[in-house]
Image: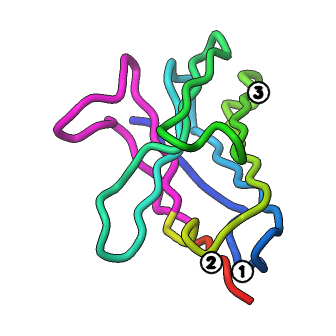
Amino acid sequence: QVQLVESGGGLVQPGGRLRLSCTASGSIYLMGWFRQAPGKQREMVASITSALTPRYGDSMTDRFTISRVNQKNAIYLSMENLRPEDTAVYYCAADPQKFSPPQIATYWGQGTQVTVSS
């Protein structure tokens, strides 16, 4: 069983920056970030393997950067030029193999709220 703990969410003005962190209780191959806005489906923001190979969701490459420190079992999501439409709960996820439906990931964090508003 792997536990995921996120931190770093909050309120930010449009155009601002935030950095989310997620720490796992143990090492695991694939980790990533998903987000879910009110009334919308959960979508993948980015993922990264233990080999540090990143992958981004549609329209996520220009303002989001995922990184990982294996020694800390941690991943990070740097977000810049944030927009109101980025407002969502951001979830850390992890899986020993891959993210795939229906459950997408084996392990999920509790989520951290990101609100972009003036």
Secondary structure mostly seen in magenta is: loop
Rendered location of residue 60, percent (x, y): 58, 43
Rendered location of residue 34, percent (x, y): 46, 49
Most foreground residue, 22 or 41: 41
- Could you say whether the residue bearing mark 1 is in a helix, strand or loop? strand
At label 1, the amino acid type is Leu
Rendered image quadrant of residue 69: top right
**Cα distance between the residues tagged 1 and 3:** 26 Å
Crowd rating for badge 2 (residues with CA inside 10 Å; few <14, some 14–19, many 20+): many
Q: Tell me the residue that label 3 is attached to.
A: 69
Decide if residue 114 is on the left or right side of residue 103. right
| Range covered by the magenta-colored residues | 90-112
Q: Residue at x 70, y 75 (%)?
A: 10
- Could you say whether the residue bearing mark 3 is in a helix, strand or loop? strand
**In front of the other: label 3 or label 2?**
2
**In front of the other: label 1 or label 3?**
1
Rendered location of residue 1, percent (x, y): 39, 35
- 87 relative to 102, above or below: below
Q: Tell me the residue that label 1 is attached to.
A: 11
